[in-house]
Amino acid sequence: MSQIYSTEPVTEGKVLLHTSLGDIDIELWSKQAPKTCRNFLSLCLSGSLDDTRFDRVLKDFLVQHQGNPEDDASSVGPKPEYHPRIRFNHRGQVAMVKGSASKFFITLDTADHLYQKCTIFGKVTGPTMFNVLRMGNIATDDNECPEHPVTLTSVEVLSNPFEDLVIVHTNNRHTLAEEAAAAAAAKSQVVARKSIKNTGMLSFGPGADSSSDSDDDGNGSNRGKPPVLAILVKSSHDVDERPKKRRKKNKDKRHRNKERVARDEVLVARTGVEDVEGVAATQDATTEVVATTEAEGVEAEVASSSLADRLGRFKKMNPLDLEDDEEDDY
């Protein structure tokens, strides 16, 4: 099969048939059969093939389209065009019915006996060939017509090799007056859509939108409309009075005062001296010495209240007896 396709010339032009059984992709040989391809494209662009049927199905042979129903039986198609490299040697070949200007068929198998009798102008490509095979397997009556009609809904020209071939769709033709009226109606719809305002929107502050609806202007033109709710929002920077922050009490200072009172009570109990101001001063000096010795790596327990203890022991071991010394002198 690949050898057969390689002998065929390159196609130029492409159309897509939209049928009730799926799409059919057809590529055209516009250089090898220019007259036939031009005639087929003119039918596609003018809409003559829209909403028509495939009226004949021969199983394992071909599927035929009825062409343009308005075409006269006496009309003659373009002259036959044959090419030695394009033959009925595989399925999917698209050709014109002999003597017809609009009827065409698609082969379902080889048909060498039709060579130089019908002009081949295109071929079915891609997976759309399976839709053609489905069409060839449907049930038919005694006249070889499908029992369930197969409709060609529309034709889409994907690639037009003839630049001068531009035909207006006959089914959608309009006069200049109808086109002007349709354009005016579309323009009025756009203007009406722009003029509609949403009166249910909220206005955040006065003057937020000068074009929005406001209260009654005194003429009664806004009566019956829902009132506009104005909401004023203040930020934290707009507040005049701010609560003052309370300063936290110095808990460390209180704690140090309690420690000092407890330390004074201990000194009074040891020395028996009620006036502890001097002793407290001595203790403060001792504390500073202890802090200095701790920085140098000396233990804190050696220097704690050592001066007061030494003074107490010294008084007990060496009492002062001045009277005895005076008697010895005299």
Image (cartoon, rainbow, N blue to C red):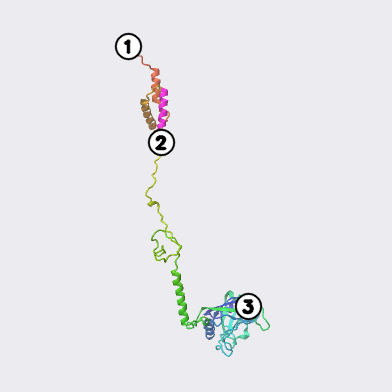
Between 25 and 150, which is closer to the camera in this rendering? 150
Instruction: Identify which amino acid the numbered label 3 is placed on.
Output: Met
Circle 1 SS class: helix
Residue to which mark 3 is pinned: 135
Quadrant of the rendering where the C terminus is positioned: top left
Between 320 and 208, which is closer to the camera in this rendering? 208
Separation (CA) of disc 2 from disc 1: 55 Å
Q: What secondary structure prevails in the magenta region?
A: helix
Q: Quadrant of residue 255?
A: top left
Residue most extreme to the right: 142
Position of residue 118 in the picture relative to residue 288 (left or right): right
Separation (CA) of disc 3 from disc 2: 99 Å
Could you say where residue 67 lies in the image, as x and y percent from the top left? 58, 84
Could you say where residue 254 lies in the image, as x and y percent from the top left? 41, 34
Highlighted range, magenta: 255-270
Can residue 259 be seen here? The reply is yes
Residue to which mark 1 is pinned: 326
Q: Quadrant of residue 325?
A: top left
Q: Mark 2 or mark 1, which is nearer to you? A: 2
Which of the two labelled residues, at mark 2 and mark 1, occupies the earlier sequence position? 2
Position of residue 73 in the picture relative to residue 232 (left or right): right
Could you say where residue 135 lies in the image, as x and y percent from the top left? 63, 78
The 10 Å Cα crowd at callout 2, few under 14, some 14 to 19, many 20 or more, is: few
Q: Name the residue at 32% across, 11% down.
A: 326
Question: In the rendering, which numbered label is found on residue 247?
Answer: none
